[in-house]
Image (cartoon, helix red, strand yellow):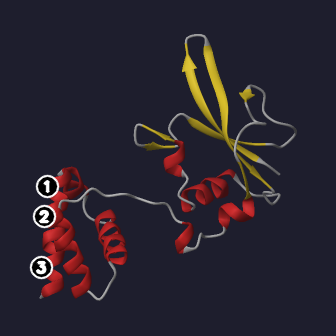
Amino acid sequence: MRYVVARVITSPAGAVKTARLLITDVPSGTQLGDVLAALEAAGKSADFSEAGVPFGNHEIKADTRGWPWGIHAIDEAPRVTWEKLTTPPSRGEGRRVTLRLTDAEHARYTLAAQRAGQSLQEWMVAAAEAAEVAPASAAEQGRRGARKAAALADAESTS
């Protein structure tokens, strides 16, 4: 069984659906919710989001009796097997994030990581994971809020 993730653009002339990802070798009986959960667990929801809404303007369709009509570029869409999609990546296969820090920020975070007995990479990942569960109001404060949170985390790690 196969599934396709398609981007949907709606206009007064009608909807245009373009394939963005083809998922192959999906076990029969797999439900749409399972496919959605697998995409989210694999970190793919950001690839198929618009305006910060996961899967905004996208739909997921199963190939039950031939592809649904009206989806363009299925043959050109990137492909992934169900096994690869559902197998967690090793740490080295993760995505890269580049941060622009001032010299003072870099020094402060490096010292905090050393005090915690972690590499800067490990410390940054832990800080990002802690921020992910923080109340939304802290996230809305932007960069100033992030600096305060990092300073608080730094102060907590020294006490």
**Three-letter code for the amino acid on which mark 1 is drawn:** Arg
Q: Position of residue 114 (x, y in %)?
A: 25, 85
- Residue at screen point 53% across, 33% down: 57
Measure how far apart labels 2 and 3 are at the Cα level. 10 Å
Q: Position of residue 3 (x, y in %)?
A: 74, 47
Q: Quick one: which residue is furthest to the front in this view?
A: 103
Residue assigned mark 2 = 148
Measure how far apart labels 3 and 1 are at the Cα level. 16 Å
Q: Quick one: which residue is furthest to the top in this view?
A: 13
**Three-letter code for the amino acid on which mark 2 is drawn:** Lys
The circle drawn on residue 155 is: 3
Is the residue 96 above or below the residue 159 in the image? above
Measure how far apart labels 1 and 2 are at the Cα level. 6 Å
Check disc 2: other Cα within 10 Å, few if <14, some if 14-19, many if 20+: few
The image quarter in which residue 116 lies: bottom left
- Residue at screen point 59% across, 29% down: 8
Q: Position of residue 67 (x, y in %)?
A: 81, 36
Q: Quick one: which residue is furthest to the right in this view?
A: 65
Side of 140 relative to 85 (left or right): left
The circle drawn on residue 46 is: none
Is the residue 7 above or below the residue 84 in the image? above
Cβ atoms under marks 1 and 2 closer than 8 Å: yes
- Residue at screen point 68% across, 51% down: 32
The secondary element bearing badge 1 is classed as: helix
Cβ atoms under marks 2 and 3 closer than 8 Å: no
Whichever of labels 2 and 3 marks the residue nearer the N terminus, that label is 2
Side of 54 relative to 64 (left or right): left
**Three-letter code for the amino acid on which mark 3 is drawn:** Ala
Residue assigned mark 1 = 144
The secondary element bearing badge 3 is classed as: helix
Of residues 106 and 137, which is closer to you in this image? 106
Q: Position of residue 64 (x, y in %)?
A: 83, 43
